[in-house]
Image (spheres, helix red, strand yellow):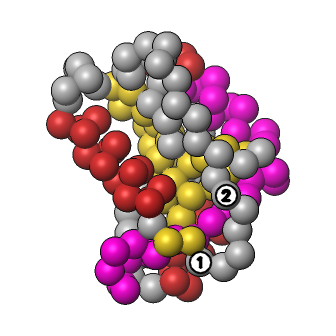
Amino acid sequence: MSGVPSFAFVTFGSASDRRLAGWTAFRDSILTATAIGDVPPVLVSASTNVPPPVGIWRLLASNNRELARSWVAYPSCDAARADVTRLQSAVSSLAVTVVRGRSASHYGWFATLDGVPVISSGRWFGALSTSAHSAATTLADFAHATV
């Protein structure tokens, strides 16, 4: 019997935490990558009245390998947990975009809800097909993962 995926909630000590910088850099690289196929533009809004980020969520496989991560940083773990629950109930409404990074062997993906990014892959993949497969299986796992 295979294990059930689960969510891990990661908190940052400050806005200058190196883990936050790494998460932000990866998310930004997914955002600026080249979309594969005909996809609508992504809506990204910036607000100047956002509280400092406290943490993110990560979806982990039963072997602790990261499957996906939150697109946004949250002001509290409670806010992150509430958003996971909201997204779990909306999984069938998520739209996936597969992207190619700066290298021909870097493919990733992100999912949007109503045109707004909400989830990204946890890493780059070496092939387009692997990235697309990861997105499909990850969203299936997302729906029933333990919060």
Residue 66 found in image quarter: bottom left
Name the kind of residue labelled 1 in the image. Ile
For residue 66, side relative to residue 116 (left or right) = left
Q: Residue at x 39, y 27 (%)?
A: 55
Tell me the CA gap for discs 2 and 1: 12 Å
| Tag shown at residue 5 | none
Location of residue 145 in the rendering, given as x and y in whole percent from the top left corner? 61, 45
**Which element is circle 2 on?**
loop
Q: Residue at x 50, y 41 (%)?
A: 70
Report the span colored magenta.
Answer: 80-107
Location of residue 15 in the rendering, given as x and y in whole percent from the top left corner? 26, 23
10 Å crowding of disc 2: few (<14), some (14-19), many (20+):
few
Answer whether residue 86 is visible to the viewer in this image: yes
**Vertical comparison of 94 with 7: above or below:** below
In the picture of the structure, the residue carrying the numbered disc 2 is 41
Mark before the other along the chain sequence, 2 or 1: 1
**Vertical comparison of 107 with 80: above or below:** below
Magenta segment: does it hold 85?
A: yes
Q: Residue at x 81, y 51 (%)?
A: 93
Magenta segment: does it hold 78?
A: no
In the picture of the structure, the residue carrying the numbered disc 1 is 36
Location of residue 60 in the rendering, given as x and y in whole percent from the top left corner? 45, 50
Location of residue 133 in the rendering, given as x and y in whole percent from the top left corner? 59, 76
Quadrant of the rendering where the C terminus is positioned: top right
Residue 105 found in image quarter: bottom left
Q: How many marks?
A: 2
Quadrant of the rendering where the N terminus is positioned: bottom right
